[in-house]
Image (cartoon, rainbow, N blue to C red):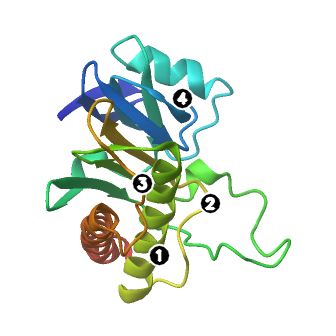
């Protein structure tokens, strides 16, 4: 993983880049490279608060190394990323919690003028050392989300996440495929523990920096 910086709109912005290379399959909710497919890199790019560009996908492409990859954005400081590992699983989280939200919020309960990229984002990247079926990959996203929500509630935040959270899980293409990735399966449990640790630590570190 590499951390680089650039200057945009007068601000010094960071970006995290994981260059996996050939032989990896990923599932992601990201704008660039989302869905399930073979990907070679993951980018988590910091953007200015109040991001208003209308071409976010093209913007992410311009920041990436070229080829097929996954690109996520956040207004959080990516140089404050948190990494946690468990049994060969590595989880990285960048945590922004300016406006945490409940998933099942009342209609109209949040100011529609608060564009998602303005209010903070939790982006999570997970690398798993074993291949998985498509169904198991979908299951990893559920497990990541459940672990994230558990961490936020334990850290005292009233919400299950933010309106713009993104996730990416990377697994090898080759090898015996895991059929399950729920929180009580072997690798699902490892994913859950790693994500929980990373997000909780990130949330606890975020609060004192933004509570004044």
Horizontally, residue 204 falls left or right of residue 76, namely: left
Judged by depth in the image, the label closer to the viewer, 2 or 4, is 4
Horizontally, residue 89 falls left or right of residue 25, namely: left
Q: Is residue 155 above or below residue 104?
A: below
Q: Label 1: few (<14), some or many (≥20) within 10 Å?
A: many
Q: Earlier in the sequence, mark 4 or mark 1?
A: 4
Compute the Cα span from label 1 to label 3.
Answer: 24 Å
Label 4, on which residue? Answer: 32
Label 1, on which residue? Answer: 149
Judged by depth in the image, the label closer to the viewer, 2 or 3, is 3
Compute the Cα span from label 4 to label 1.
Answer: 24 Å
| Numbered disc 2: secondary structure | loop
Horizontally, residue 196 falls left or right of residue 113, namely: left
Q: Earlier in the sequence, mark 2 or mark 3?
A: 2
Q: Earlier in the sequence, mark 1 or mark 2?
A: 1
Label 3, on which residue? Answer: 179
Judged by depth in the image, the label closer to the viewer, 1 or 3, is 3
Residue at 42% from the left image edge and 63% from the top image edge: 144
Label 2, on which residue? Answer: 163
| Numbered disc 3: secondary structure | loop
């Amino acid at each position: 993983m590499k951390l680089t910086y650039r200057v945009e709109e007068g601000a010094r912005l960071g970006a995290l880049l994981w260059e996996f290379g050939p032989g990896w399959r990923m599932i992601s909710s990201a704008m660039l490279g989302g869905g399930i497919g073979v990907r070679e890199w993951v980018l988590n790019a910091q953007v200015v608060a109040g991001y208003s560009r209308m071409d976010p996908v093209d913007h992410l492409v311009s920041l990436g190394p070229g080829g097929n990859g996954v690109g996520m954005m956040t207004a959080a400081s990516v140089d404050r990323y948190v990494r946690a590992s468990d049994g060969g699983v590595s989880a990285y989280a960048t945590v922004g919690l300016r406006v945490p939200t409940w998933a099942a919020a009342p209609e109209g309960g949040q100011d529609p003028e608060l564009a998602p990229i303005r209010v903070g984002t939790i982006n999570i990247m997970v690398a798993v050392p074993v291949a998985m079926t498509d169904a198991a990959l979908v299951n990893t996203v559920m497990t990541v989300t459940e672990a994230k929500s558990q961490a936020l509630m334990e850290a005292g935040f009233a919400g299950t996440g933010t309106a713009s959270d993104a996730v990416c899980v990377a697994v090898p293409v080759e090898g015996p495929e895991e059929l399950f990735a729920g929180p009580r399966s072997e690798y699902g449990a490892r994913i859950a523990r790693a994500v929980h640790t990373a997000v909780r630590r990130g949330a606890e570190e975020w609060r004192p920096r933004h509570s004044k």
